[in-house]
Image: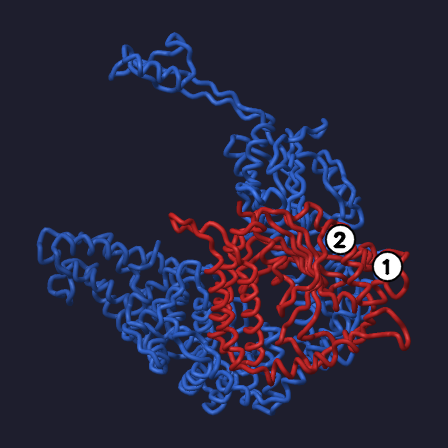
Chain colours: A blue, B red
Amino acid sequence: MPDLLLELFSEEIPARMQAKAAEDLRRMVTDKLVAEGLVYEGAKAFATPRRLALTVHGIPARQPDLKTERRGPKIGAADAAVQGFLKATGLTSLDEAKIQRDPKGDFYIALIEKPGRDAIDVLAEILPVIIRTFPWPKSMRWGARSGKPGSLSWVRPLHAITATFGLETEEPDVVKFAVDGIEAGQTTHGHRFMAPDAISVRRFEDYEAKLKAAKVILDPQARKDIIFADAKELTFAQGFELVEDQVLLDEVSGLVEWPVVMMGSFEAEYLAIPDEVIRATIRNNQKCFVVKDPKTGKLTNKFVLTANIEAPDGGKTIVAGNERVIRPRLSDAKFFYETDLKTKLEDRLPKFEQIVFHEKLGTQAERIKRIERLAAEIAPLVGADVAKATRAAHLAKADLLTEVVGEFPEVQGLMGKYYALAQGEDASVAAACEEHYKPQGPADRVPTDPVSVAVALADKLDTLVGFWAIDEKPTGSKDPYALRRAALGVIRLIAENALRLSIMKMAASALAGLSLKPADAQKLPSDLLAFFADRLKVQLREQGARHDLVDAVFALGGQDDLLMIVRRVEALGKFLETDDGKNLLAGIKRASNILGIEEKKDKRTFDGAPDAALYGLGEEKALAKAIGEVKAEASAAVAKEDFAAAMSAMAKLRPPVDAFFEKVRVNDEDAKVRENRLKLLNEIRSATRAVADFSKIQD
Amino acid sequence: MDASLPAHMRPERSFQGFILALQRFWAEQGCVILQPYDMEMGAGTFHPATTLRALGPKPWNAAYVQPSRRPKDGRYGENPNRMQHYYQFQVIMKPSPPNLQELYLKSLAAIGIDSAMHDIRFVEDDWESPTLGAWGLGWECWCDGMEVSQFTYFQQVAGVECAPVAGELTYGLERLAMYVQGVDRVYDLNFNGREGDAKVTYGDVFLQAEREYSKHNFEVADTAMLFEQFKMAESACRKYLEAGWQKNSESGKREAHLMSLPAYDQCIKASHVFNLLDARGVISVTERQSYILRVRELAKACGEAWIHTEAGGAA
């Protein structure tokens, strides 16, 4: 079956957009082919800075024919209806129609055969539409045509389209279409500088090979592999080690069609700058990798650059040029760092009085005061020294006003630590300057030093409560203040450090520290708790755990100790994986269902203790006895926060519950017996509520 | 590069030769070579030959040097490459020609940067000017890891959609010349290409000015006067715009504008005064935004006026 080759050749596509664009192109073309009845065998898309390319192989040469029947008017219907039918179906007279007998009368039926079209014609129709509607994150107009309405929008000016279709054994055909004056053909170009001439291509195989000969590596993964392998080899050969950086590798591979990896160096005096600052300088501004000395683990005065060209002088000029650019950058960074060291962190704080944190939440200075107060309050609860926690909260944001952080925002916190150590702060206080921002995401490390924990919690709670108070909660995909991340951070700080804290109390305390008083202040802590419950569910789902168990625990009410909630959920999850757990859950659900139905029927609940005198069957007595024992045992275990033991106690309910349902008919003819049995069922439910509301658990 | 040039005129030997080579190259591409606009501005884009001429349907190809004033970037002449006054070389071509990238690369060759020997790259850089109500897509152009130019396809300027789109190139002249001359400190640039006693450096021409203006911009500039000037420029701009509208005598509908350029001068003035106030540190973070917005409103009103003028394509 024939294959499609499509290439969209343009001016330089931003590196960060290339991977998604290739995937979008593949998805859009193949979806459309399938929708047109053209089921293909395989497809692969590629991107370089100057081209998007797609190969789809095994496309049928023709669409299948379509046969459809269309029912027309009744025999003897008005002429207008008949004419309309003929026109719509393309029949010349009613003689060509079949007649279908039907109890409602006899109808004309037209048999319409729609012959499938050649796939190349279908492609000529769908490709221009896909190009015109391509979902670039940002696109633009250009050139003379942009003066007229309806001109093409593309990520950068589009110069050529290659589109061929055909069998491997034959000369393929060009898919004939044009978009905004650009005719599809089979001519592309090689590397901008090393092989700029036109190349005529037939199909994917020769396309990829000819591009390679013209110094273009089409496959982004292949470019990454080359850069990574060459960079490792280059550094290893000199006894150094590459500092691996996947994000940078992705970006760099999107900036070159022909990667040429080389190593440069800078003056050793710049190694006096913290490693992270050197790295930020070289990475952000120059898109180069840094190199470390495996003996010390520290950076060395080398860097690895990726050029897009094999220069006749072996790259000497390029390396020298990059070195000349990096030198003043590092010189600036060193100057910033040394300047920063001349001012104490606390001396920077008055400036925060001029800096608005949020229009409704006051200045940064006010926010820092709130965090200090909250950190002091939390400190004893997490085993931190109050004075140290307060001091850390006082200084933690000060590095935002330093030159280095102004230049490289990603080293915020870290620089705070360096500057705090340099001015002789306590090690925990310095560490907290960095760690109070953590954890930044699900993969980030959670701080364990109590001082860091106290400030991290205070910082995040102040943010959450503040934005809740001004009603700037996250909605849908919008979370401009990263409140979801902050809530998840609180959850992880508490769970991973096994902290005992009441979210409600902490929220109320943070709220009391705000200068504004929201109208629904009373509701705020419980609203926020519900948000935590949601975040906890999301986190558990991402870990592959059962998020519905969170609902089952929260449904108990009064639960705002996140650690206990997490522990309960864990124990419950383990229990439900056992046979006892599964069967007990089934039994409890059955009891709940019966109760639900009967409560509705009788318009009443069946609370209250059952009357032992009314037990007629042994299974009833056995169940009642088991409930009594389990309730006591489970409650005692819960009181000791031993949820696993509470679950083991629960497991003892399973045999009597099973036996009860097997032998006992709940809806006895005697109304009193029936009521008593319903009360007994209700007891099962209430006994199990010692650990969770089982009715909230999904099957 | 033109081999027939005498040594002191070669772009790798002399700053002025470097500028002349660029001017000559773009003149050969059909650009009109303008002289700098006679007002203080933060970037070559503010020149009416770019801001206003980018608007409307009429073709326009121009190139010029524009002194750029960035009061905040002053370093009292002590930083090797940051200055409060420097030169930009600006090219604008409307509509953007299909081979603008190739022309740009050839212009680099004309100033001695051989694209076979150097690593030239087009790295994403979306351009936006909040004060001009303008944005475009393009790149920063890298030479061996150094940003040497901005390359932008204007999509909107002064709040008006560009139709057709203009291509804009901005070369940071000092930085490029430093690279080509192989010096690490801007003040060491050879300005006139002569040697010995006849040699004039960039520092001979500008170092004193950098020291004086840094003091002025950061310490002394009269803020009361500047606040007043901002207000005066803003109200003059509005006044000239209003006076320039030619209205239909019956419907009162605005039909043509007769004074967009003088009005726009006041917008340029307001923008520069704002930059000075900003450098003096007398504008708070929240006020800053509102000043930018006020300048943008002026720019937009000037753009609207311009497209009702003859050169703006009206009638």
Residue furthest to the top? A95
Distance Cα–Cα, label 1 vs label 2: 35 Å
Q: How many marks?
A: 2
Left or right of A513? Residue A331 is right
Residue A512: % across, % down: 33, 82
Using the image as rendered, state which of residue B231 and residue B252 is in the foreground: B252
Q: Which mark is residue A248?
A: none
Say which of marks 1 and 2 sits in front.
Answer: 2
The C terminus of chain A appears in which quarter of the rendering?
bottom left
Using the image as rendered, state which of residue A482 and residue A387 is in the foreground: A482
Q: Which residue is mark 1?
A: A314
Letter of the chain that mark 2 sits on in the rendering: B
Q: Which mark is residue B27?
A: 2
User: In which image quadrant can residue B202 be found?
Assistant: bottom right
Residue neighbourhood size for the residue with mark 2, other residues' Cα within 10 Å, grouped as few (<14), some (14–19), many (≥20): some
**Callout 1, which amino acid?**
Gly
**Callout 2, which amino acid?**
Ala
Residue B58: % across, % down: 61, 47
Residue B146: % across, % down: 73, 65
Tell me if residue B196 comes above or below residue B311 in the rendering.
below
User: In which image quadrant can residue B7 be found?
Assistant: bottom right
Q: Residue at x 57, y 52 (%)?
A: B55
